[in-house]
Amino acid sequence: MEKMFSSCYKLESIDLSGFDTSTVTNMEHMFFDCSNVQLLDVSGFNTSNVTNMNGMFYGTGWASKILHLDVSNFDTSNVTDMG
């Protein structure tokens, strides 16, 4: 899933409800520069096998329109890069 939605600055919402992330190991820059996304529900992500989350939400920072981002269910026990 590395760079899957990278530079998606024109998107306002992304439906991730059907994503099976149980075998994903790399989410680096997955939502890089998605600054116009208002709805981003990643609460159903299974991140137990992810080792790289480097810059996963990079570029969605201060200019972001996301009002709520729930990552409370993320299992980061195998992540070695969260830069």
Image: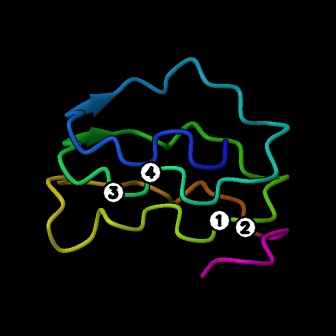
Which colour style is shown? rainbow
In the displayed structure, would residue 12 be above or below residue 15? below
Residue for badge 4: 31
Mark positioned earlier in the residue sequence (3 or 1): 3
- Which one is in front in this view, the residue at disc 2 or the one at disc 3? 3
Q: Under tag 4, what secondary structure?
A: loop
Q: Disc 1 to disc 2, how far (Cα)?
A: 9 Å
Residue at image coords 81%, 78%: 80
Please identify the dominant SS of the magenta region: loop
Quickly name the residue at label 1.
Answer: 53
Report if residue 79 lies within the magenta region: yes
Discs 1/2, front = 1
**In the rendering, at what x and y percent does residue 43 appear?**
50, 43
Query: Dot 1: few (<14), some (14–19), or many (≥20) neighbours within 10 Å?
Result: many
Instruction: Pick out the residue farthest to the front.
Output: 7
The quadrant of the image that shows the C terminus is bottom right
